[in-house]
Amino acid sequence: MLVLSRRPHESIVIPECGITIRVVAIEGNRVRVGIEAPPDVRIIREELFLETRPAAEAEQFCHA
């Protein structure tokens, strides 16, 4: 895992995928993140992703 520090309004770009992740705001212990991606790229919160996957796939995702 790559861990980067960013300040509000700074971004991380994944050019091969056409994805930009921007820190929109930091409020206390919460960070608001904006994600720009092509329309065909699904973006889903992890907890929802794990709920919709079969248990075996979710387990593999968590430990990959």
Image (cartoon, rainbow, N blue to C red):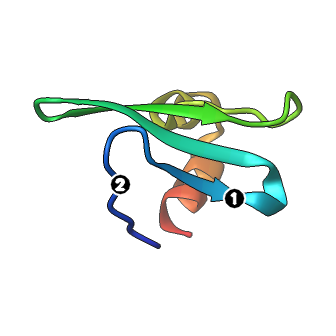
Quadrant for the C terminus, please.
bottom right
Q: Amino acid at mark 1?
A: Ile
At horizontal 69% and vertical 58% (from top left) the residue drawn is 14
Mark closer to the chain start, 1 or 2: 2
The picture places residue 43, in percent across and down from the top left corner, at 66, 33
Q: Nearer the viewer, mark 1 or mark 2?
A: 2
Q: Secondary structure at mark 2?
A: loop
The percent position of residue 40, horizontal first and vertical second, equals 89, 32
Q: How many marks?
A: 2
What is the number of the mark on residue 49? Answer: none
Q: Please give the residue where the numbered disc 2 appears in the rendered image.
A: 6
What amino acid type should be assigned to the residue bearing mark 2? Arg
Residue drawn 81% across the image and 54% down it: 17
Q: Position of residue 23 (x, y in %)?
A: 41, 39
Spatial CA distance of label 1 from label 2 is 15 Å
Q: Secondary structure at mark 1?
A: strand
**Where residue 59 appears, x then y in whole percent?**
53, 55
Give the residue pinned by disc 1. 14
Dividing the picture into quarters, in which one does residue 52 lie?
Answer: top right
Observer-nearest residue: 47 or 29? 29
> Left of 5 or right of it: where is 34?
right
Disc 2 crowd rating (10 Å Cα; few below 14, some 14-19, many 20+) is few
Res. 1 visible in picture: no
